[in-house]
Image: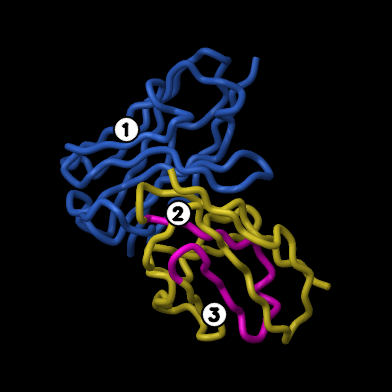
Amino acid sequence: EVQLVESGGGLVQPGGSLRLSCSASGFTFSSYAIHWVRQAPGKGLEYVSAISSNGGRTYYADSVKDRFTISRDNSKNTLYLQMSSLRAEDTAVYYCVKAPSSSWYYYFDYWGQGTLVTVSS
Amino acid sequence: DIQMTQSPSTLSASVGDRVTITCRASQSFSRWLAWYQQKPGKAPKLLIYDASSLESGVPSRFSGSGSGTEFTLTISSLQPDDFATYYCQQYNSYWTFGQGTKVEIK
């Protein structure tokens, strides 16, 4: 069974940093591109970032570019999102999301349960 | 960037109704579009991919169609479990979601 379990969320002050993790199981982690998608309270889904199966290619939405860094450790089946210079508008549930292929442009077939990040003083 | 616009934003319907949600893209592409269903407090669930392919385990009352700049999700006979929010997503050029359509009980 495919499982994606996010952790690392919490309350952080504006301008602060936080690192999210996503632990994967039930599939060959190193064979798939993985993404982060977020959802602000009561709002819609917003795409955040992607990383290729071997970590060699990444993509960031304009809203997080130069502030967030996505990475992965295929030996640990774990995805990371390092978030810095956090703003109130980064407050959201962050989902770790798997694509069904190593190819870059694909839909998402499995989602984690999400971890809540709250940016507030 | 490709922008996705869904309509309507909210839809009130009754059990048994045929429901159609539309997703329009700011640029044309062939079939790289997915539909997701989300219930309150839960992660989204994949329903349709490649515009019209039904994900395994999804009831056949759900169907998708379209290409170019206009895509539709149709629920042929709305069931109580279908009251939720639905999102379209393009994956032709990076990834973008529509703003969502909430299907409410009439």
Q: Which image quarter: residue B17?
A: bottom right
Residue contact at pointers 2 and 3, CB within 8 angstroms: no
Q: Which residue occupies the foreground of this view, A26 or B25?
A: B25
Q: Position of residue A47 (x, y in %)?
A: 46, 43
Query: Do circles 2 and 1 both sit on a common chain?
Result: no
Q: Colour of chain B?
A: yellow
- Quick check: is B89 in the magenta stretch? yes
Residue appearing at x 60%, y 67% in the figure: B22
Residue contact at pointers 1 and 3, CB within 8 angstroms: no
Q: Circle 3 sits in a helix, a strand or a loop, which is it?
A: strand
- What type is the residue that disc 3 sits on? Phe
Q: Circle 1 sits in a helix, a strand or a loop, which is it?
A: strand
- Chain letter of disc 2 in the image: B
Q: Give the mark nearest the N terminus, 2 or 3.
A: 2
Crowding at mark 1 (Cα within 10 Å: few <14, some 14-19, many 20+)? many
Q: Is residue A30 above or below residue A9?
A: below
Q: Circle 2 sits in a helix, a strand or a loop, which is it?
A: strand
Residue behind mark 3 = B62
- Chain letter of disc 1 in the image: A
- What type is the residue that disc 1 sits on? Ile
Q: Position of residue B102 (x, y in %)?
A: 69, 61
Disc 1/disc 3 C-alpha distance (Å): 34 Å
The furthest residue to the right = B106
Disc 2/disc 3 C-alpha distance (Å): 25 Å
Q: Which mark is residue A70?
A: 1
Residue behind mark 2 = B27
Residue appearing at x 61%, y 51% in the figure: B99
Q: Which residues are magenta?
A: B67-91
Q: Which chain wears blue?
A: A
